[in-house]
Amino acid sequence: MLHVVHHPAYVSPATPGSGFRFDKYGLVMDALAESGAPFLRHTPQPMPRRWIEAVHDPVYVEEVLSLTVPAAKERRIGFPVTERVMRRSLLSPGGTWAAAKLAQQHGYAANAAGGSHHALADTGAGYCVFNDLAIAASRLIAEGDAARILILDLDVHQGDGTASLLAGRSDIFTLSVHAEKNFPVRKARSTLDIGLPDGTGDDAYLATVRDVLPRVLDDFGPDLILYQAGVDPHGEDRLGRLALTDEGLAARDRFVVAQALGRCIPVASTMGGGYGADRMAVARRHAACMIRMADEAVSAAYRRP
């Protein structure tokens, strides 16, 4: 059974002056429904302000909440911060935190949003307002729900914001496997970065993940994984530079969950990137990602120690 966190406010109208569309987050739920796969929908609560400010500069947090984000920061984000955008920016971190708590019960759970891995301490960037991965990880550890967390970022873009916000923490490991020449131009330093050349396909990509992930799991010993499961490494993605097929993405996700649950480590996924003119096709890729990971969790017969 797939446990998926979703809120209707994840979907917001396109903001004036921006080409970014938020309808993918609703289309993913449509794609799950049309798949016929069983799933339970869970509704998140907004992330309390104090946990956002544990990661982000309180001045920036106030700018978002009061809808006074300077124009320069809005340009860096990629769209204006409206009332609707502000609300979903509180709900998305709450959804990632809720998915992590559900994963600890069921082995795997998904946030049908999230993965805002470009947001920095004092500004958003790259279509990201608040960094839900860093916020959720920090809260989980502070409240004693986890001791060591791996943030596994397999989005096609480097998780520069996550790396910057969590730099120097020994209890959170950031691992990013991304297209080296893609956005952002200036990379941050994750605990471990692996930049891949343009056009990397299934075989080379999977060989990299299969080599590095088991070693990180064994050496670092996390008790929870937050998985940035972007589908933008797909060869047809509008903003990707890699060349994975549907089968390659499926093998990637099954391997991640099998390796984690084989060590009794729960996995919570965030949607991350996925872009294209056919938004329903992108939504189906995201939905398929969640469904196969839930299926793998059932096959692994997860049992929390």
Image (cartoon, grey):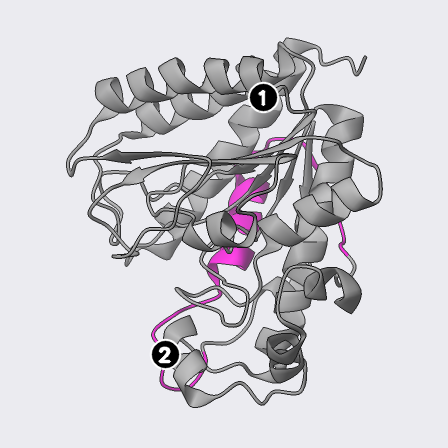
**Viewer-closest of 287 and 73:** 73
Q: Which mark is residue 52?
A: none
Judge whether residue 41 can be spotted in this image. Answer: no
Say which quadrant the N terminus sits in.
Answer: top right
Q: Do we see residue 96 in this rendering?
A: yes
Disc 1 residue type (three-letter):
Phe
**Is 288 left, or right, of 251 in this rendering?**
right
- Residue under pointer 1: 220
The residue lying toward the viewer, choosing from 87 and 305, is 305
Residue 145 within the magenta-colored segment of the rendering: no
**In the picture shown, does residue 209 fall above or below 2?**
above
Q: Could you tell me residue 227's position as x and y percent?
A: 54, 36
Q: Residue at x 64, y 24 (%)?
A: 222
Image position, residue 156 (x, y; %): 33, 43
Point out the residue furthest to the front here: 168
Query: Dot 2 lies on which element?
Result: loop
Q: Is residue 1 left or right of residue 245?
A: right
Q: In this picture, which residue range is highlighted in magenta?
A: 15-44
Residue at label 2?
18
Q: What amino acid is at disc 2?
A: Ser
The picture quadrant where one finds residue 171 is top right
- Residue 101 sits in quarter: top right
Tell me the residue at 75%/31% (across/down): 147
Quarter occupied by the C terminus: top right
Q: Nearer the viewer, residue 35 or 221?
A: 221
